[in-house]
Image (cartoon, helix red, strand yellow):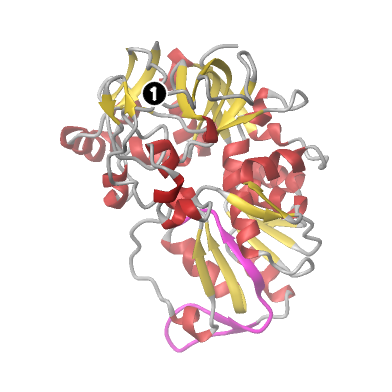
Amino acid sequence: MKGVAFDVSIPGFVMAKTAGKLMDSAFFGPLSGLRMQDLPEPDLPGPDWVKVEVIQSGVCGSDIGCLTYSASPAMEPFGSFPAVLGHEIVGRVKLAGEGVEELACGQRVTIDPMISCETRGYERSDFCPSCSSGLHCTCERAGEKGLTTVNGKILAPGVTIGYHRDLPGGWGETVLAHKSQVFAVDDKVSDDTAVLIEPFSIAMHAVLGTVPHPEAPVLVLGSGTIALATIWALRATGHEGLILSQVKREHEKQMAQKMGATEVVFPGQDATKALLKTGAMEYKPIIGEEVFSGGGFAAVYDCVGNTQSLAQSMKFSSPRGKVAVIGCVGKTRNMDLTMLWARELKVQGFVGYGLEEWEGERCHTFEVVQSLLGRTRNTIEEIVTHKFPLEDYYKALKTSGNHRESGAIKVLLQARG
């Protein structure tokens, strides 16, 4: 099978940090650790596994962060390389093991790429606390080898498919997944919508984990897929209050409005004016930037994850407000945390998905999202702005990485039509 594989290395890091400032090829092209390769197709590890023929896969901001070595090295022990990247996947069942009764060959599916204790081969009685609670996105064995064997090798450490040397991701022609990771796609759901179920589930998990009052004002920072998905998730779960979206470009403003934002502003004075409309009062300390008191947003969803966005999240929050950090924040500098304690804020990070309490039942976030897609009028596939065949991965990554110039929101790589 063909796959776009990436290998982490010290020379690659040096190249990215030097030549990467001058040319994209140091990140995505011939000078990088990224290559289209002919790879052996993996065999089913056991009767509860599924082989999926990839239709298309998304390019995520975390992929770009990995390729450009701009992400924090803190997660390095929880991946294994070389790896075929890609964790936003829609495909068709190519082969199902004898223990897989719910899926048939040719059926369209999407994949939860987070690797659980069950995927690693452990019995339920020996699951880690996270997996036992249904929140496998924080599986506590991510840094360990598993019991499962793939093509005769013990399963390597890793958090997710796509950053794993034994479980190739969607930037290839074939994906392996445990049956617990595979979800059938409704016939009414298009391929472009289906590939978005994974990132939309991240946003949904954050929204269900914060549950702001239905009429409270909330703020969503960011203009990428996760931010737009957060706006959609808020509306889809019944939020009726003000949703203020902060973006940087006009086409992102239009998309935020389509997803359900009440008002969309650009950073700076526009955002400050919107904050003051909530009843906040502005004060100027002797030294430093202005601060606010009163009003504010009951929930702030930070889908950017940098020093500036975190500072704004705390500054714009109401007392005892909730700050949901969904952006892949890493190291920060000169962070003023005064408002964290002065307003008794609740700050929580979110990654992935799992079992949710939804309408009186416990079901997977993917199931919640797909159910709500059938009830809402929003056409989320408009978020997909660019598609490229797999062999044009360099163009795809350059388009995604330079989204300010390209106008890209979600870029897809297509293994086949």
> Which amino acid, by three-letter code, is at mark 1?
Pro
Count of numbered circles on the image: 1
**Front-most of residues 75 and 341:** 75
Residue 102 placement (x, y as % from top left): 64, 26
Is the N terminus in the top left, top right, bottom left or bottom right quadrant? top left
Q: Secondary structure at mark 1?
A: loop
Q: Residue at coordinates 31% horizontally, 32% vertically from top-left?
A: 155
Q: Residue at coordinates 63% horizontally, 17% vertically from top-left?
A: 104
Find the magenta span and give its range: 281-305
As for residue 293 lying within the magenta part, the answer is: yes
As for residue 44 lying within the magenta part, the answer is: no
For label 1, the residue is 45
Pick out the residue farthest to the left. Answer: 11
> Does 299 sit left or right of 83 as displayed?
right
Residue 142 placement (x, y as % from top left): 34, 46
Establish if 60 lies above or below 294.
above
Q: Residue at coordinates 30% horizontally, 39% vertically from top-left?
A: 157
Establish if 143 lies above or below 246.
above
Q: Residue at coordinates 53% horizontally, 68% vertically from top-left?
A: 312
**Front-most of residues 385 and 23:** 385
Establish if 294 lies above or below 133.
below
Q: Is residue 237 visible?
A: yes
**Front-most of residues 356 and 174:** 356
